[in-house]
Amino acid sequence: MGKKLDAALFSVGVNILLLVSKIIVAFLTGSISLYAESAHSMFDLVSSILAYVGIKKAQEPSDDTHHFGHEKFENLSSLAQTLLLAGTGCIVIFESYQKILAPTPIESPSLALGLMIVSIPITYFTSRYLADHAKEEHSSALEADSTHFLTDSISSIAVLIGLAFAHFGYSLGDPLAAFAVGLIMLYLSIDLGSHSFRVFMDFSPDEKTLSKIESAVNSEKRITRFHKLRARLAGKRILVEVHIQVPHDMDIITAHNISHDVEKAIIAQVPLVKEVTVHIEPD
């Protein structure tokens, strides 16, 4: 968990640096696309803070009000980030549309171009750093944060192109670039939101994971058969239920030990499984 928190704090620091630099240059140049990028970075900063809070909350153990733990707080953080991204995208699209109708020249476009050239590799490599930690730690909050930085990198390229056009006298390039940034935000917000939606609606894991769970149950040869195998997502973890049948003359102690062995086999096959509920029935 320490690695995830460190990654989230690193994300906060990078976002503060980018936000301050973009606001300053946007103010000096009057670029609407840079103002859009500043709004994007403001959102990214809030997202990074939400990611940190979500990760920290998710590590809390089960208690009287959360019997299955707090893992879904990461997904709640991811969902909040998604909503912020969508809202920011809508604002950026509206503002850029106003500027498309009445484009204005940019002061010192070379300064804005320089900032974009510097910020693109920073956002890209930060995105890769967060993505690696998200994959290693199975963190939905870091995955969302990584996607935001990737969006920032892509939108910065769009802004760079728009500013380049503005530098050569085509002032319409700036608001068009901002419009593209807004569309990218909306697209990625839908993509991110779908994952959080799956978790909160108790979707089952993918077919490959379910197959591994089924294989683990089948590996126990002392049961005669099993049924009602169910699994659902709980944050980054998985909760499993299964009914196993044993010979009707088997003693309760042996049957109980078998249920524990089934649980261990499932967790060994799929380490992301948090809990396994095994119901024993006579055959």
Image (tube, rainbow, N blue to C red):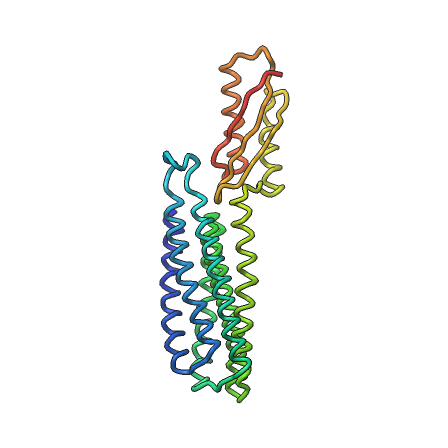
The spot of residue 36 in percent (x, y) is 47, 72
**Please, which residue is most extreme toward the top here?**
249
Q: Quadrant of residue 6?
A: bottom left
Question: Which residue is at a point 41% across and 66% down the rendered structure image?
Answer: 42
Q: Which residue is more in the foreground, 125 or 84?
A: 84
The spot of residue 228 in percent (x, y) is 61, 29
Question: Which residue is at a point 38% across and 43% down the rendered structure image?
Answer: 59
On screen, residue 111 versus residue 168, left or right, reads left
**Please, which residue is most extreme toward the bottom here?**
169
The spot of residue 46 in percent (x, y) is 40, 60
The spot of residue 184 in percent (x, y) is 55, 66
- Please, is residue 6 above or below residue 70 in the view? below
Question: Which residue is at a point 63% across and 23% down the rendered structure image?
Answer: 225
Q: Quadrant of residue 203?
A: top right
- Please, is residue 267 above or below residue 166 in the view? above
Q: Which residue is more in the foreground, 223 or 229?
A: 229
